[in-house]
Image (spheres, coloured by chain):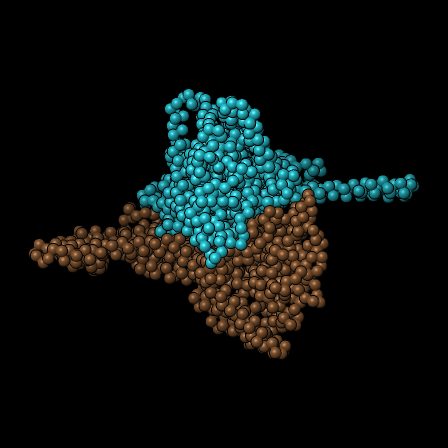
Chain colours: A cyan, B brown
């Protein structure tokens, strides 16, 4: 703008001398102004980029797009599956081959792709994220390669119609996107170099993942908090909500733009009656369903554990299986798609429906059977699948539940990206529908209410069953909230919450959650929170893993010493001890403070010697020889800001306690002292190494949250005890 | 059972000798068995009582009953108000007197009762609970007297129809119930003597309070977490959900049992259409409403602050007002009820409706005006209030919003139990209804969607407006969730969340939340969380407030010393130092360990001397004279469990840092060392005293959560610095 002004000036005033002067003046003015503006804009841009909400919006947007595109691809894949199947309807064997080969091909591609590009893409991702967020970063777990590998193989896996879901992988994808976005943003703004902040952003990534997967921002934010953390900061809760809301909004907006839908709606919008949601007498049934689902959930986790261990054993003994990595996925796919082949056994378990279609049919507000007679659904594709000339709807639903149960348990053991949330959801919904249909048959006129007849809605039972079974497997409450957002109905909040809580109570007392089970089986370096009054089992202490070679400064340090120390590494703070002999820790000094001291000193020297040295010396900041001699003087710390109370540990502090303090107080490092003497330093790096080395051979045992409700012990006392003898051995005195 | 068996035995076998023997045998057996059973049952009972879920259920039940009974009373009071008003319809002046005097009488009674019984009952209670839960227990704040005072005056206040709510007081009541229940339960089970656990239960009490107030368990649990804590433990989140769910369940069950309602429903159940909740083009309107409500919320907080300070000033200068404490409430009540007198000005602001009735009318799914003509609502009492022959609905709604705005701001400054949540809710709903009606008039056929005509539902705007304005005043997200549970509709989750987030963004950057404002105005001893990289303003260090007289044991302690120390107080742990001269801290020993040492010693002595002393000495545990001499021996600590790393601070650790550590790590005490020497101890008691003494004169300044999003600083460095000179002064060397 200013340069344009200048050129306009030129035209208006002609080329007189005074004009030329004013021109040159205005030009220089405009130049300096535009430089100022540019730097101002740059600063604005950096601060804009550095603002949390910008990051959260971008993250939400990216995740929404990924989720939407993935859904489109998966839809196309499943449509193609149906198309090939219909194409081959000349002969049933041909049809069978088309049905099975398609799934097998996609599955093999997915497994192979994940195996070649990045094996870290396999599995759900939630257990691994849990481990990462507790402090131990897994290798190669948040790279771009893993992201590509996970997204592409997930599309193929979902396209192959195995009973697996996308919610677990989406938590992983969300965190990867957050981590990569942080890396990208760090090119523009220094705030993204802060690792603790980036880790918080990964928690947000988990929330966005769920939020974009089910279009459930509230449930997503809560689920990510429940699953990934033992304690959460209000800040992260806010961030999760903000990002997940925006993500879910975009995720639901895209189908509208794409003309697939009319407006923003729940993913599985339902049409249950609003005036009388449920009868009081139905509540005990919901409660019993919660209890049964609790047992079912625990059994699922148990079954999954058994299958995984069995497969592991087989792989270890059978070298053939080990070599042909694709064989196991291929075999499982053939088995499952053979059983669900629609003209074959699949006709007894609605094999032609995808997971989404089954869910829509379960949540339908109509009753399928009345007085044992199945209503006429021939005009509805989804519901027609549940009608069979030979078997009634109860038999089909029971077969569906039983078959899907073990199929899902097997499927999620495959080395592919897969989530357990959605298949469990489907099984729970089927179970609920079974119960609901049963009740509707037993009480065809509903429970009478003062003359009004309110029929039983079996769809509601499907909703409750889905929430309760998922809660039993994942040990969370937020599944109930997700369920409400998914179906767009909150009228059933109380039945859902009651069954979810009961299911949790049962399953938490029987088995760990599926995520904790994976952590245990995979032996991930997860360190559980030190529970108060819980005896320490791992006998590792700070003294065993601290770094003993500490770089420090003393009160007698010369400027040269400081110069050397600053050059030798980039520690943010340095400990200040009294003297090399006593090693008494006085406090810590920030690197910036020391740099300022050095600069001040050299400027001071230059000023003093200014008349005697040529002017060029003053311009270049070089440490000259004559100056170097001055550097042997003792440092004057008088104007230096010293932190008088850096975080201190003693050698006998246990690993658990150290880890708890580091994670809760968000520390980067702590000094280890013995009778006031600095003997070592522990940073996050040492701590992580120690944690990885301290895992028990059979993996970490995790306690479910509700178990802490049963604790009788007094809290607050860190009962890490030792015997006097050992204590005195360690004490240097 | 066993004694019955015995008597049956007697009848069957007659009175032969052998029978008598068997009888006496079985009798003695049954006796000993019944004693064993009794103790077993007692143990079972204690462990049952000690179980968290029992406590949570009882708490939920009590709160539900209180909430329900309170609602019944308030309904009766308002009905009586209408009855008296109708009775006096012979003359308008009489009617006016009846209308105003009734309110004034109730209000004066409430203010007087609260003033006489327990002045702590006044106000909302959330700011005070926030302070309590952050560590500083306010005097007399959780007593039974306060509970009674709060409940009874709250009933009268709500009965007087001032624009105040019951949600804030219910948070307080919930916490009081939790605290009192803990006290009661501690009679049966020792676990309730654990203070930290009881404090956690108070957090749960907050959740239950909200849950029972609005029948919104999810929103309640989240609201309590957002409002009361800066960081939350997964355990408390679970407890809150469990208890709030049960409470809300009972709260909604009671009206069903009472035959007031047919089944469990949302408190303000709505009947909006499910097939097409809202048009995409309505979203910008929702967003703008969020922004406007953000400004409105900030203005409300500002207004409240100004009024409070004005009243405070008046009271300080005007001794008359100071003496007549009831004058101010009475005057305000007269003013407000005069303005809302239905035949007077009240006809322009629907003065005859209670808050509940207004809300029901705002959330109604029908459109009030079409093409500017008000529809016919004569058969509906609530809606008829909005129809006026002279003024159209927009004028009435505008007057309602403006009048209620300042009325609410004044009402919550009165020295009575009152919440600001519900009045704000009503204002927001009215504002939303105004916008909705406006849009419905501007677009009578809705926004066209491919030929389908979907009319605009103004009730939805009322829902969004209520959520957004409340969010702006309270700075929470969970108001959105509460709104969904209250109306029984989750289809509008995205509009609600978007407007809630925008409202928060605006209001958090302008004003503190209403609760933080109260904390500041009342100068409550609230210590904000130390934000990372935030310079310490209060120059208080551990050395200034620690307890210097520490009771300790040394390696040379005799049994007598330990006996004395144990008798002199009931510290849970004692520090172990090397010797009295060196004072080097070796670790800490639990009281129980020392007791065991003493017991072991005395038993050992007795065993050694057993043959020489009479048997009666062995039975009574008395320390005999001859034993006392043995007590002068040095203690053998070899078998004693010592905690080698008790929590340590140095004298220069700042108050903020100490408080953060204590609250985050849940500590009870910490030792203060100087170069390894024990110089003092800090317990929660000292810490609380120091916090109370360290408050700035104008109250604590609290930062809204979203402000942390704008932090640019690096985190993790506790930049509490000092100068070397000061440091060396403190260092004893």
Q: Position of residue B226 (x, y in %)?
A: 53, 53
Q: Is B11 placed left or right of A106 in the picture?
A: left
Q: Is A709 placed left or right of A38 in the picture?
A: left
Tell me if residue B366 comes above or below residue A556 in the rendering: below
Q: Position of residue B427 (x, y in %)?
A: 62, 61
Tell me if residue A18 comes above or below residue B303 in the rendering: above
Confirm whether residue A531 shows in the render.
no
From the viewer's side, name the closer residue of A525 and A478.
Answer: A478
Confirm whether residue B11 shows in the render.
yes
Residue reaching furthest to the left: B17
Residue found at x 71% / y 44%: A40
Q: Is B635 placed left or right of B107 in the picture?
A: left
Tell me if residue A574 comes above or below residue A146 in the rendering: below
Image quadrant where residue A583 sits: top left
From the viewer's side, name the closer residue of A624 and B35.
Answer: B35
Residue found at x 59% / y 60%: B359
């Amino acid at each position: 703008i200013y340069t344009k002004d200048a050129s306009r000036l030129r035209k208006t005033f002609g080329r007189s001398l005074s004009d030329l002067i004013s021109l040159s003046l205005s030009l220089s003015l405009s130049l300096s102004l535009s430089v100022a503006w540019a730097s101002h804009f740059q600063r604005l841009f950096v601060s804009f980029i550095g603002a949390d909400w910008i990051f959260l919006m971008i993250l939400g947007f990216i995740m929404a797009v990924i989720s939407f595109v993935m859904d489109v691809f998966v839809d196309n894949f499943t449509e193609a599956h149906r198309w090939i199947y219909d194409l081959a309807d000349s002969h049933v064997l041909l049809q069978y081959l088309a049905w099975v080969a398609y799934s097998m091909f996609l599955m093999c591609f997915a497994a192979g792709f994940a195996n070649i590009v990045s094996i870290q893409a396999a599995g759900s991702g939630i257990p691994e994220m849990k481990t990462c967020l507790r402090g131990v970063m897994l290798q190669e777990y948040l790279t771009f390669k893993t992201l590509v590998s996970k997204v592409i193989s997930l599309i193929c896996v979902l396209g192959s119609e195995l009973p697996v879901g996308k919610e677990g992988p989406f938590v992983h994808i969300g965190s990867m996107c957050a981590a990569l976005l942080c890396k990208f943003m760090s090119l523009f703004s220094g705030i993204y170099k802060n690792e603790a902040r980036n880790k918080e952003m990964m928690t947000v990534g988990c929330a966005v993942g769920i939020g974009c997967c089910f279009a459930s921002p509230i449930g997503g934010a809560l689920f990510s908090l429940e699953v990934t953390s033992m304690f959460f900061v209000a800040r992260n809760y806010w961030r999760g909500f903000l990002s997940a809301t925006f993500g879910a909004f975009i995720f639901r907006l895209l189908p509208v733009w794409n003309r697939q839908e009319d407006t923003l709606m729940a993913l599985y919008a339902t049409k249950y009656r609003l005036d009388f949601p449920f009868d009081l007498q139905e509540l005990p049934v919901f409660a019993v369903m919660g209890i049964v689902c609790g047992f079912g959930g625990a059994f699922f986790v148990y079954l999954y554990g058994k299958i995984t261990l069995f497969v592991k054993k087989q792989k270890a003994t059978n070298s053939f299986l080990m070599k042909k990595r694709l064989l196991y996925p291929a075999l499982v796919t053939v088995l499952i798609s053979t059983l669900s082949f629609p003209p074959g056994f699949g006709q007894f378990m609605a094999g032609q429906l995808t997971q989404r279609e089954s869910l829509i049919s379960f949540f339908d507000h109509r009753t399928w059977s009345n007085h044992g007679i199945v209503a006429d659904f021939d005009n509805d594709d989804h519901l027609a699948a549940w009608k069979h000339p030979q078997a009634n709807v109860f038999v089909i639903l029971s077969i569906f539940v039983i078959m899907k149960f073990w199929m899902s348990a097997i499927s999620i053991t495959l080395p592919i990206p897969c989530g357990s949330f959605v298949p469990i959801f489907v099984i729970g919904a089927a179970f609920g529908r079974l119960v609901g249909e049963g009740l509707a048959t037993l009480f065809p006129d509903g429970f009478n209410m003062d003359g009004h007849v309110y029929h039983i809605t079996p769809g509601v039972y499907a909703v409750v069953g889905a929430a309760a079974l998922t809660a039993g497997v994942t040990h969370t409450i937020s599944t109930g909230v997700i369920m409400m957002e998914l179906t767009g109905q909150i009228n059933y909040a109380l039945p859902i919450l009651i069954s979810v809580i009961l299911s949790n109570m049962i399953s938490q007392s029987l088995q760990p959650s599926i995520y904790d089970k994976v952590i245990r089986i995979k032996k991930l370096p997860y360190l559980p929170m030190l529970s108060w009054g819980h005896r320490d089992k791992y006998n590792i202490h700070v003294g065993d893993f601290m770094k003993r070679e500490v770089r420090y400064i003393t009160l007698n340090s010369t400027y040269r010493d400081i110069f050397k120390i600053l050059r030798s590494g980039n520690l943010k703070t340095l400990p200040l001890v009294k003297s090399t002999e006593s090693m008494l820790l006085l406090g810590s000094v920030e690197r910036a403070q020391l740099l300022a001291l050095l600069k001040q000193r050299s400027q001071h020297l230059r000023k003093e010697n200014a008349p005697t040295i040529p002017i060029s010396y003053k311009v270049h900041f070089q440490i000259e020889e004559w100056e170097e001699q001055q550097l042997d003087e003792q440092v004057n710390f008088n104007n230096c800001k010293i932190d008088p109370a850096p975080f201190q540990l003693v050698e006998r502090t246990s690993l658990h306690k150290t880890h708890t303090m580091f994670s809760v107080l968000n520390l980067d490092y702590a000094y280890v002292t013995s009778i006031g003497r600095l003997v070592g330093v522990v940073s996050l790096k040492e701590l992580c190494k120690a944690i990885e080395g301290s895992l028990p051979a059979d993996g970490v045992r995790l306690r479910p949250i509700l178990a802490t409700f049963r604790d009788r012990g007094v809290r607050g006392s860190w009962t890490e005890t030792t015997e006097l003898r050992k204590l005195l051995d360690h004490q240097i005195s």
